[in-house]
Image (tube, helix red, strand yellow):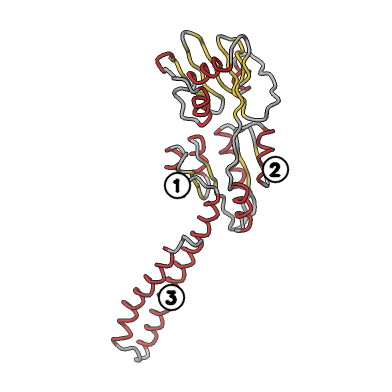
Amino acid sequence: VHPEAGYTEQSLLEVAALAESFSDHPIAQSVRVAYQGEVDPKRVSDSTNDAGHGVTATIDGKHVVVGNAKMLAAAGVEAPDCEVVGTILHVLVDGVYAGHIVIADTVKADAEQTIRDLHAAGVKRTVMLTGDREEVAAAVAKQLGLDEFHAQLLPGDKVERVEALLAAESGKGKLAFVGDGINDAPVLTRADVGIAMGAMGSDAAIEAADVVLMDDKPSNISRAIRVARKTMAIVWQNIIFALGVKLLILVLAALGIANMWLAVFGDVGVAIIAILNAMRAMGVKNL
């Protein structure tokens, strides 16, 4: 926390926490947790959220802007540089720069292994789309071994990037997108496969996704791929087996060889075998 203009760390956090009091964004939650004091929403009025930039609000009669450098520039103030790597939250009170708060994401413990598992599973290209600053995205991409990254993206920019990736697909390639925020919902809908992180994800992201990971472990993305492949393999086994046996019985019946017992096996017996084979899909714990 880097206060200026006579503010202390605690008073700067208080202003930011009050401005973010009506937001469920992870950054807003982090600020409120860091403040540790009681946030009284009654002190806040005229709160507005500018997606991808920040929030504005009136706090105790003072106009407050909390957001990124673009939001500060729109207010006619140039944001100072900060040597700390992370997402910077600038605070403006009645046109006076009060300081900034740096928030750094922590990479999940299994994220690096997840990227290796995805490549091992046949994923050709891993791309990160983020609203964070270029240097933050570059550091994370290098740590995780990502093939490509795009930083400082607004929600609309993410959709455009996904559209470009979809246009670049060749053959039978499919694009899967993993996200958890409300801003990710349009991209989750547009991707061939949308995967939402359910435990911390927004309701909009969960509703838009095709797959929901309930424990927020990135490693379960590759596990979901293995489960899907095993399930589809069993489905095709059952289809080929059932059709093959029934066609064989039809041929034997046409030749006058098939009897009633063979017809019963072709109906009930094939169904029982297909069900037993399908039960193998329940053994996903070992995948």
Q: Position of residue 209 (x, y in %)?
A: 46, 45
Q: Amino acid at mark 1?
A: Met
Check disc 2 and report its element: helix, strand or loop: helix
The crowd level at tag 1 (other Cα within 10 Å; few <14, some 14-19, many 20+) is some
Determine the residue positioned at 37% across, 90% down: 255
Q: Which mark is residue 142?
A: 2
| Farthest-out residue, left | 260
Q: Which mark is residue 241?
A: 3
Determine the residue positioned at 57% across, 22% down: 67
Question: Which one is earlier in the sequence, the residue at label 1 or at label 2?
Answer: 2
Q: Amino acid at mark 2?
A: Lys
The crowd level at tag 2 (other Cα within 10 Å; few <14, some 14-19, many 20+) is few
Q: Which residue is mark 1?
A: 214
**Disc 3 versus disc 2: distance between alpha carbons?**
47 Å
Q: Amino acid at mark 3?
A: Phe
Check disc 3 and report its element: helix, strand or loop: helix
Q: Residue 123 lies in what quarter of the image?
A: bottom right
**Disc 1 versus disc 2: distance between alpha carbons?**
27 Å
**Disc 1 versus disc 3: distance between alpha carbons?**
35 Å
Say which of 206 and 282 sits in front: 282
